[in-house]
Amino acid sequence: MRPIYKRNRNCGYTLVEVLVSSAILMIGISAASSLSLTMVTMEEINHRVGRSLNVLENCARLYQLGIEPAGIYGTATALLPDETAVNTLSPVEVVVGNLDSCVFTMTIDSVIDTGAWSDGRWTGGSKASPDQRQAILRAFRPSIR
């Protein structure tokens, strides 16, 4: 007599199980890609702010060495080159006792505008002014007159 084999229906995955597991996997992948985009944006912002603060500190050190503020930054004959992230840099000289001091106020564009102009309209990015930050540094030097 020949044995009768029953089909085992419990082997493998059902279509619903596969769809649910793939949906969970896609949620995880989209979260990871969103996080990586945020990290790249923050890295760009930190890089721009770091370069700008470097310019500000260099302005202060050159002032302490005796160079006039007009010859440090922002003119064609300035010692420091222009930085794209620096929106404005304004030095204000103040005499404090026998010390000369200069307050350097800098406005930094920390986020670049990613908008594109095509066919007479914006296709992306922000239409408003970019995110700006302000940094203030006071530098002193002895008055040698």
Image (tube, helix red, strand yellow):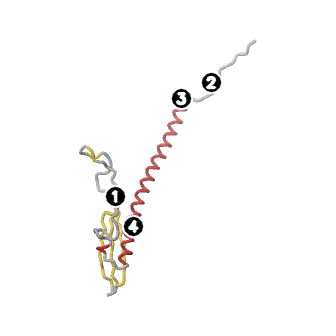
Q: Amino acid at mark 3?
A: Leu
The residue under label 2 is 9
Quick check: marks 4 and 2 in contact, CB under 8 Å? Answer: no
> Mark 4, mark 1: which one is toward the viewer?
4
Residue visible at 37% across and 68% down in the picture = 55
Q: Amino acid at mark 4?
A: Leu
The residue under label 1 is 131
Q: Secondary structure at mark 2?
A: loop
Work out how far the residue at label 4 is from the one at label 3, CA to CA, in angstroms.
Answer: 57 Å
Observer-nearest residue: 98 or 78? Answer: 78
Residue visible at 25% across and 45% down in the picture = 121
Observer-nearest residue: 26 or 117? Answer: 117
Q: Residue furthest front?
A: 77
Observer-nearest residue: 142 or 23? Answer: 142
Q: Residue furthest right?
A: 1
Residue 44 place in picture, x, y as percent: 41, 56
Which badge, 1 or 2, is on the more N-terminal residue?
Answer: 2
Work out how far the residue at label 4 is from the one at label 2, CA to CA, in angstroms.
Answer: 68 Å
Observer-nearest residue: 107 or 18? Answer: 107
Which badge, 4 or 2, is on the more N-terminal residue?
Answer: 2
Which badge, 3 or 2, is on the more N-terminal residue?
Answer: 2
Which badge, 4 or 1, is on the more N-terminal residue?
Answer: 4
Q: Amino acid at mark 1?
A: Asp
Q: Is residue 21 left or right of residue 37?
A: right
Q: Give the number of the disc on residue 53.
A: 4
Q: Amino acid at mark 2?
A: Arg
Work out how far the residue at label 4 is from the one at label 1, CA to CA, in angstroms.
Answer: 16 Å
Q: Give the number of the disc on residue 15.
A: 3
> Mark 4, mark 2: which one is toward the viewer?
4
Which badge, 3 or 1, is on the more N-terminal residue?
Answer: 3
> Mark 4, mark 3: which one is toward the viewer?
4
